[in-house]
Image (cartoon, helix red, strand yellow):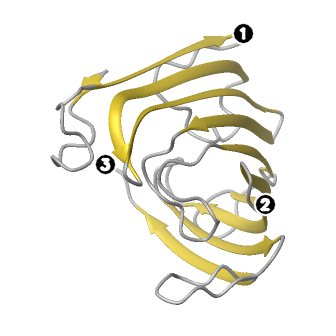
Amino acid sequence: MMAEGAEDGASNPDDNPRFAGRVSASLLEPETDWFNQGTYLGKKRVLSIGAGIDTQDNLVLNGREQDYSAWTADIFFDGGGFTVEAAYIGIENGPNPINFTRMSAGDDMAIISVKAGYLLPGEIFFGPVQPFVHFETVDVDGRDDTDIYGFGINHFIKGPANKLSLDLTYLDQERETKTPGAPPVQDHLVVTFQMAAGF
């Protein structure tokens, strides 16, 4: 992909393009989409390994000109009712802050993410049900870490694109802070109920 990326004159004065790419290898049944579906509802047995990059040069972040780059490596397995996904993301001079962490524009950081679910046999009401758990850790260079723990349940009405989801996520800060004029960085619980419909 080649795109405009950051467009405003303040952060991208040279109007440099943004480049991104991804490659993946399917070792069992093939996946043909840019991203996996999260689950194939027991209809496929998939083991995929992927990697991606994202770059944009000469961005002005926190008053300094810096080259942004990010890369990721991930693995995904779905079969026998189990779904497991793990990913590592490395970011150098990130252009956008992440408010629930201590990341600011221009920081370097690493994210490790692990997710797992199990598709219960049979159907409940309209379709299959999948309890899941997830863990992420966000490590910003020179700052305190944020750990994220969660669990929830998916209720698939018609395929993976049409579902109801309930997720309980706890954000655990290594150190809580309140900075005037900035969102507080505190331990807190996030409850998400979501309905997705795909056509």
Q: Residue 2 carries which label?
A: none
Q: Distance between the residues labelled 3 and 1?
A: 29 Å
Position of residue 47 in the picture relative to residue 10 (left or right): right
**Label 1 packing within 10 angstroms: few (<14), some (14-19), many (20+):** few
Cα separation between marks 2 and 3 = 39 Å
Q: Residues within 10 Å of mark 2 (few under 14, many from 20)?
A: some
As displayed, is residue 76 above or below residue 179?
above
First reached walking from the N terminus: tag 2 or tag 3: 2
Residue 158 x, y percent position in the rendering: 49, 53
Q: Position of residue 89 (x, y in %)?
A: 65, 36
Q: Distance between the residues labelled 2 and 1?
A: 34 Å
* Residue 56 occupies quadrant: top left
Helix, strand or loop status at disc 2: loop
Residue 195 x/y as whole percent: 47, 69
Residue where numbered disc 3 is placed: 199
Q: Which amino acid does label 2 sit on?
A: Asp
Judge left or right: residue 42 versus residue 95.
right
Nearer the camera: disc 2 or disc 1: 2
Contact? badges 2 and 1 (CB < 8 Å): no
**Residue 104's spot in the image, x, y percent?**
53, 59
In the picture, measured across the screen, residue 197 lies left or right of residue 38, that is left
Mark 1: secondary structure: loop
Labels 3 and 1: the sequence-earlier one: 1
Front disc: 3 or 1: 1
Name the residue located 45 percent from the left edge and 27 percent from the top edge.
54
Rendered residue at 64%/66% (across/down): 101
Toward the viewer: 187 or 142? 142
Q: Which residue is drawn at 49% across and 47% down?
A: 106
Q: Closer to the N terminus: mark 2 or mark 1?
A: 1
Which residue bears the numbered disc 2?
145
Q: Is residue 46 above or below residue 110?
A: above
